[in-house]
Image (cartoon, rainbow, N blue to C red):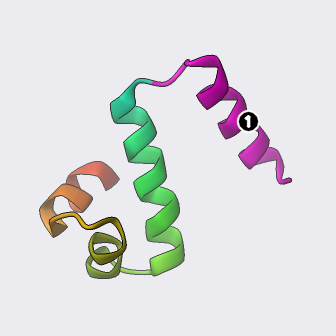
Amino acid sequence: MRAGAEERNGLIESGALTAEELLRRYTRIVFAQAGSIEATARRLDLDRLTVKARLG
């Protein structure tokens, strides 16, 4: 497992992230894989504006 994934898992398991921060981080992970806001929105079943807001 990568160091970033280990850190992320630790934060999740410890409850250190707010729900909003968890959603923002997950959206960034999916965006990095999907390559576009539109593809990310489709994968997450979200509106494009919601994805853009979470990407900050």
Q: Which residue is drawn at 83% across and 53% down?
A: 2
Quarter holding residue 9: top right
How many numbered dots are placed on residues in this image?
A: 1
Horizontally, is 9 left or right of 41 in the view? right
Q: Does the magenta stretch include residue 22?
A: no
Q: Position of residue 37 (x, y in %)?
A: 29, 74
Horizontally, is 56 left or right of 12 in the view? left
Instruction: Reply above or below: 26 against 36.
Output: above
Note whether residue 23 is visible.
yes
Instruction: Reply above or below: 42 against 21.
Output: below
Q: Mark 1 points at which residue?
A: 7
Horizontally, is 2 left or right of 56 in the view? right
In the image, 46 versus 29, the foreground residue is 46
Q: What range of the chain is rendered magenta?
A: 1-17
Q: What element carries label 1?
A: helix
Q: Residue at x 41, y 24 (%)?
A: 18
Secondary structure of the magenta portion, mostly?
helix
Q: Which residue is drawn at 60% across and 30% down?
A: 12
